[in-house]
Image (cartoon, rainbow, N blue to C red):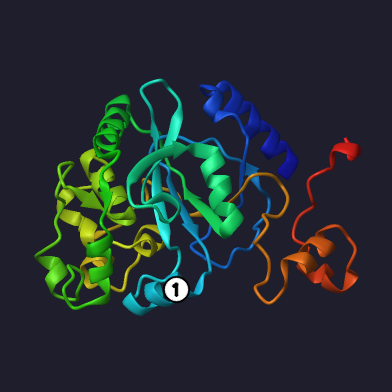
Amino acid sequence: MGSLVSSLLAVGCLLGGTDDAAPQSYLYQPAFSLDGAHRLPATPYCPQPGDIVFATDYTVFWTVTHNYVGAFHPHHSAIIIRLPDGRLGMFEGGPHDTLHLEIMDLLPNMAWYAEDGRVWVRPRAKPLTPEQSDRLTEFALKQVGKRFALIRQGAQLTPFRTRGPLRTWFVGKPAGPDRCSYYCSEVVTEAIVYAGLLAAEDARPPATYPHDLFMDWSLNPFLNRHFKLAPDWCPPSLWTACLDYLPRQYPHWLSKDLWRRQIEGQDPRLAQFRLVPHCPKTSDK
């Protein structure tokens, strides 16, 4: 039954639009969970404007600082837009620890993030209207090349921030497209407000973390009460480039070499961690 559903979804992707929509990657079953489990069955992923992408790694610096301010995992967020030439792109602030806002090639960029950790997607539950998609693109194009808000992001570690149990009710409202700098979850929130996908009075972009966008709940009282992406966005699903493992999606206490030996069937002691079949090698096809 799972293979039948996957086949039907694949046909739907191929019939549903441009080559960008072809099933070149997959999503596991959705869950508001960061455990990285491969919840089967995996289905072909058809990207669309408005989908929100999350990435995280497990480096000590980012994990400690995010946990300290209550941001936790995931560490990064981005949003998919349709470019004027019809291609899909991934709009984000500070991709791969850089200091500018950029629009990246979609699937190669997702695979790059997956090399360093894990990637999830919150797909739109219903497609954007042409007007909403155009507004999202308009906002993104205005931001390309602007600075990543490194100083304001650093201020999250101090009392001088817009996020707080009381202050978020009064400060941190959407600033629109003319701010000189943004950080990742801030610019995603500003983008969805500008596109008319979320009411401005319910949003606090400078006080919003990727974890808030991911979970639909927050430790911040204002955001927990007002800021909800459901039902317009589906719950997050773990993303994969193929029905295999991604290099660092393994139990953290294992070495990369041990995990690869397990995937290749060379270490039966690790069989309990086998989650899905590995992709066929060229010689197997």
Question: What residue lies at 77% left-to-right and 65% top-to-bottom?
Answer: 257
The answer to whether residue 74 is seen in the rendering is yes
Of 162 and 152, the residue lying toward us: 152
Residue 181, placed above or below residue 4: below
Q: Position of residue 243 (x, y in %)?
A: 71, 47
Q: Secondary structure at mark 1?
A: helix
Q: Quadrant of the N terminus?
A: top right
Q: Is residue 47 left or right of residue 27?
A: left
The answer to whether residue 238 is seen in the rendering is no
Mark 1 crowd level (few <14, some 14–19, many ≥20, 10 Å Cα): few
Of 118 and 166, the residue lying toward us: 118
Residue 245, placed above or below residue 219: above
Quarter assignment of residue 136:
top left
Q: Quadrant of the C terminus?
A: top right
Question: What residue lies at 53% left-to-right and 69% top-to-bottom?
Answer: 58
Q: Position of residue 207 (x, y in %)?
A: 23, 64
Question: What residue lies at 45% left-to-right and 63% top-to-bottom?
Answer: 74
Q: Position of residue 208 (x, y in %)?
A: 28, 61
Q: Position of residue 281 (x, y in %)?
A: 84, 42
In the rendered image, which residue does mark 1 sit on? 61
Residue 208, placed above or below residue 98: below
Q: Amino acid at mark 1?
A: Phe
For the image shown, how many numbered marks are present on the structure? 1
Question: What residue lies at 53% left-to-right and 60% top-to-bottom?
Answer: 31
Q: Is residue 41 left or right of residue 228?
A: right
Q: Is residue 120 left or right of residue 176?
A: right
